[in-house]
Amino acid sequence: MNSALLNQSTLENDAFVTGGGADFGEMDFAWLKAAIYRSRWILLGGAILGAVIGLVLALLATPLYTATATIQIESQGPQILGGESDASGIQETNEKEYRKTQVAILTSRTLLERVARTLNYTKDPAFFDRLDMDRPSSAVGSDDYVRSVVSALSERTNVSEQTDTRLVDIHFTGPDPKQAQSIVNTIGTQFIQETLERRFATTDYSRRYLQQQIDRTRALLQNSERALINYEQSAGITNVGASNDDKTHVSLTDSNLNAMNDAFAKAQSARILAETQWSKTAGAALMSIPEVMNNPTIQSMQIDRAGKVTQLQGELERHSETYPTVQTLRAQIASIDVMMDTAAKRIRQSIKDQYDIARDQEASMAQSVTALRNASLNEQTRGIQLSTLKRDADTNHQLYDALLGRFREINATAGVTINNISVIDPAEVPQTPVWPLPVFNFLIGLVAGAIAGMLVAFLRERLDDTVRTPDEVERRLGLPLVGLVPMLKDSDVAADIADPTSSFSESIYSIRTSLQLATAHGIPRTLAFTSTQQGEGKSTTALALAKELAQSGQRTLIIDADLRRPALHRHCGLENESGFSNLLTGQTDVASLVRKSAALGDLGIMTSGPLPVSAPRLLTLETISAALDLLTPSYDVIIIDCPPVLGLADALQISSATEGTLYVHEAGRASQRQTISSLRRLRRGGANVIGILLTKFDFHRDGYSNYGYSQYYYNYEAAKN
């Protein structure tokens, strides 16, 4: 149909449209800015209203004060006597868990009830009034009233740990600063008092319990020791402990067996050594035995013999074998050899004698050990009962000593109060309320109001089904945008139409250019203007376009085809005595029906003429086609100002008889559903809808002041001025 305009409609639009099936994924900054601008008064009003409400609530609210006290919680109390332990048994390996436990105790029901009773709140009927709370229906002093008081204290008490320290802060918030101070300090003192009382109670219970256990264990120890002694006496078992403190019970036989075993082991070792030495000596040469070689006598003889041998060698060098000196030396050497052999044999015999003695001693001791072992085995049957009695006595003795030692420790520390909790900073009377904070409330109300305004604006944008922007025209209506006509003030309409440099005139030039691409021969010969409803700028735009075409040299005729509420004659300042209705009824004198206006130049104007009784009966396809056939030879372009489509059939008949139809849509007026319904009716009636004219588009109002079209023409006008 019109390829150029259809191609134009395929341009990508990324604006996020909130109405009529808009795609939430197609959101861009331009749409967001436009939406904020359109809803600026809602946002501003919501923010101001929220800020005022927040400020009023802050001024009307009861001031609340928070008193804070700081205490220190140690896992172990101070060691006053040097040997006592914490009476509470605190041996926490995890101090963090211990402190968490103490923090929980600070807000426990029992502690808060102690505080309430200490401050006499359980019997005070004005307690809830001072806290600005509703008084319970139960009687003052009753259990229900006490529970209500404790609950009120719990709601307003807060405990927090200081990071990386053993300090804990106790907070209480209420309308009375002095009461808040009193409650916080009482919580601290009562917490310390309760801890001490709990430890004292634990110590007293421990003493009584240990005393009972000591008496019972003492009786058991006496009975077990008495039974042990009686059995030893009856069995003939002698206590051979090393000292009075040594409670090891060993029989005399076992003692002798132990001593004989030690002696037998030594004798056996001595025999093994002697046997080893003899086995090395028995088959060895006499002079190779270590004991012989190390013997001083043998060594002295060897030295003496070596000297004699040396002298003999000297004599043999000077004398012969028969020389007396030589023979004497040989005799002396032989005598020394005999004495050395005799001494070596005695040494070897002594080694043999030592081996024999060690062997005999071993055999003798083995017999004694065997005899003692047999005797010990006979005593073992009696020793089983002895061992049982001894173990009972030892166990009872150890238990008695442990209980007695612990009892002495507790007695030593019974009068000492160990406290691991101390108040570091008592609470002072707070001077400044923590709530309300007027500035904070003002800012919170401002933000909350702005958010509420944003929600309302978003809902408004979402529910708004109107087509407001050029982007929405092509995306929602499925037709190309032929032109964009800016919003004009009522007092400036005639001036903007007459001014060729105005933004309105520039928009008409743009529409003319787009229409020249609508068909193969340029602007359609017959062009109908229609809209969804009355007052969308259809007649003004049609008149301005007709004027522009006439001024450009084309023979142009504009016809007011609205036979119900005609307006063209008023715009042109003409009478409406005759016109289009006369032509439809068969009057063929066209020249008498066409008029001209000095302000519009050569533009031919055909007003509606007298209004018929029934416009639909007059506006049939046959009568309209016949009328256009009479006019077409005399004009290059015929523009027909049709009535609106919504609820009427006139525009359907007229548009079906023309070559093309321009659909005029006022920005932000008719809903998308109404417009689509009207376009659907036109198509079904055979109309050739070329595109959409978006009229009364206010760049500033719709938040598109940075739209390129507006910038260009406004800057152009400024340059002209």
Image (cartoon, rainbow, N blue to C red):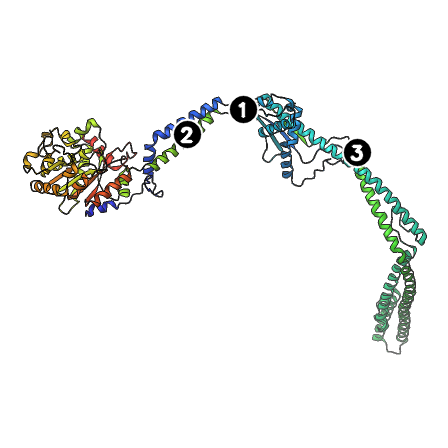
Kind of residue sitting beneath label 3: Ala
Residue at figure coordinates x 79%, y 33% from the top left: 412
Query: Is residue 426 visible to the viewer in this orientation of the structure?
Result: no
Specify which label sits upstream in the sequence, 2 or 3.
Answer: 3
Query: Does residue 83 appear to the left or right of 487 in the view shown?
Result: right
Viewer-nearest of discs 1 and 3: 1
Q: Are marks 2 and 3 in contact (CB under 8 Å)?
A: no
Q: Which residue is mark 1?
A: 64
Q: Is residue 4 above or below residue 666?
A: below
Query: Does residue 259 appear to the left or right of 624 in the view shown?
Result: right
Viewer-nearest of discs 2 and 3: 2
**Which residue is at the front of the view, 683 or 323?**
683
Residue at figure coordinates x 15%, y 29% from the top left: 570
Q: Which residue is mark 2?
A: 449
Quarter of the image for residue 667 reads: top left
Residue 114 at what x, y percent from top left? 67, 28
Q: Which residue is mark 3?
A: 412
- Callout 3: SS: helix
- Residues at marks 2 and 1, CA–CA distance in whole angstroms: 25 Å
- Callout 1: SS: loop
